[in-house]
Amino acid sequence: MTSTTNTSTTTTDEMSLDAPARVCMPWCRTNDGHEGEATVDQTCWSKDRAIPLETEDPVSPERLMGTPRDPVPYSVTYLEAPLGESTRVCVGFGDLFSIKYTPAEARRLAAHLIERAEVAER
């Protein structure tokens, strides 16, 4: 049996909670093999690293989502590795959204941010 949502296709096997445990990434915050999770949900997530944002309007998350959020806006970074896929470096704005980068893209972004910060501090 196959169910289709948008352009992705999910099989019954991928949704089964009888999926065998996977080998977690060394940085996985649960590091438990994700046993008991559906195969499509067996994603390793790192711990978040958050940076409070001093120049962002504290109510901008509420305006974006229309619901109360953390009053202090912050940027967050974390890693994710869905089963069978490459590790992604994720950069987000609080819990509203995140952008997923390959490690190479994240390095290029980091280099640009460092260069922009150096120029701004002159």
Image (spheres, rainbow, N blue to C red):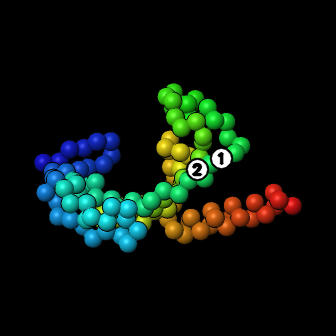
Q: Where is residue 109 in the image (x, y as percent from the top left)?
A: 62, 62
Position of 5 with respect to 36 (left or right) is: right
Residue nearer the viewer, 57 or 90:
57
Q: Position of residue 66 (x, y in %)?
A: 51, 27
Q: In which quarter of the image is residue 30?
A: bottom left
Q: What residue type is labelled 2?
A: Ser
Relative height, residue 9 to residue 78 (above, below): above
Residue displayed at 49% across by 62% down: 89
Dot 1, crowdedness within 10 Å: few (<14), some or many (≥20)? some
Residue displayed at 56% across by 64% down: 106
Q: In which quarter of the image is residue 20?
A: bottom left
Residue nearer the viewer, 50 or 113:
50
Q: Name the residue under label 1.
A: 53
Q: Which amino acid does label 1 sit on?
A: Leu
Residue displayed at 59% across by 46% down: 74
Q: From where the camera sits, is residue 14 visible?
A: no
Residue displayed at 60% across by 42% down: 73
Q: In which quarter of the image is residue 108?
A: bottom right
Q: Position of residue 48 (x, y in %)?
A: 48, 56
Dot 2, crowdedness within 10 Å: few (<14), some or many (≥20)? some
Q: Mark 2 points at which residue?
A: 75
Q: From where the camera sits, is residue 10 visible?
A: yes
Where disc 1 sits, the SS reads loop
Residues under numbered marks 2 and 1 in contact, where contact means CB atoms less than 8 Å apart? yes
Mark-to-mark CA distance, 2 and 1 = 7 Å
Looking at the image, the residue that sits furthest to the right is 122
